[in-house]
Image (cartoon, rainbow, N blue to C red):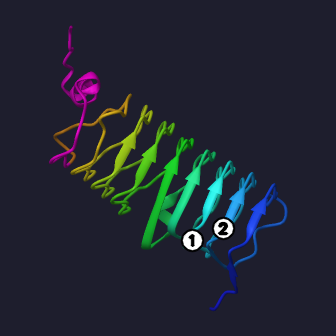
Amino acid sequence: MNQPLIDQQHFSFKDYTNSPLPKAEYSDCTFINCNFENSDLSNIAFLECNFTDCNFSNVNVMHTSFNDVAFQDCKILGVQFQNCNAFLLTFKFSGCTLNMSSFYQLKINYTKFSKCIMHQVDFTETEAKHCEFNDCDLQLSTFDRTNIEYTDFTSAYNFNINPNINQLKKAAFSKDTISGLLNSYNITLKD
């Protein structure tokens, strides 16, 4: 099914909660202060798009394509990213709240998360090699059989990662937050 191409358009202060975003392929588009909460974004392609100050809470991303997409200062609560189209999936998140979202079994290698609040995010069986979690709060996020080789956690905090069940080769951590690797052993660090 061929969808119309919408190229280099600027969308601002749009509310898509009652009138959904038209099914199309959006290329090099910018969305600012748009509300997508509880919207159906399934089967839409976003290529080289930027979302700033948008509300993506509980959106349906079934078969949605995100190729080189940037989210900045967005509210992205409860989004099941594992349902999106995994082909050429690339995105980055800066200043976003991603609480209760899921990347279950996705390949998100080289993804950058910067200054994000990521409470209760599911990374179960995710391949997240070479990722960056810069100044991210990972409180109660799940890392279970996750491949986080070469991933940078040096400024991340509130994480709980069990080295016995995750792949950590060459992952980077700071001395100040290393306790997040020891919680599963019930070990206490003292100054």
- Give the residue at x 33% y 56%: 126
Residue 76, given in percent of the width and then of the height, sits at 60, 48
Q: Residue furthest right?
A: 18
Residue 187, given in percent of the width and then of the height, sits at 19, 18
Can you say whether 170 is above or below 161 in the image? below
| Label 2 secondary element | loop
Mark seen at residue 41: 2
Mark 1 sits on what residue?
Answer: 64
Q: Residues within 10 Å of mark 2 (few under 14, many from 20)?
A: many
| Label 1 secondary element | loop
In terms of depth relative to the viewer, which is nearer, 59 or 52?
52
> What amino acid type is highlighted by mark number 1?
Thr
Can you say whether 1 is above or below 164 in the image? below
Q: CA distance from mark 1 to mark 2?
A: 7 Å
- Give the residue at x 35% y 33%: 155
Q: What span is colored magenta in the figure?
A: 167-191
> What amino acid type is highlighted by mark number 2?
Leu
In terms of depth relative to the viewer, which is nearer, 127 or 34?
34
Counting every numbered tag in the picture gives 2
Q: Are marks 1 and 2 in contact (CB under 8 Å)?
A: yes
Magenta region includes residue 180: yes
Mark seen at residue 56: none
Q: Left or right of 169: which side holds 24?
A: right
- Give the residue at x 43% y 31%: 139
Magenta region includes residue 158: no
Name which of mark 1 and mark 2 comes first in the sequence. Answer: 2
Residue 181, given in percent of the width and then of the height, sits at 23, 31
In terms of depth relative to the viewer, which is nearer, 183 or 2?
2
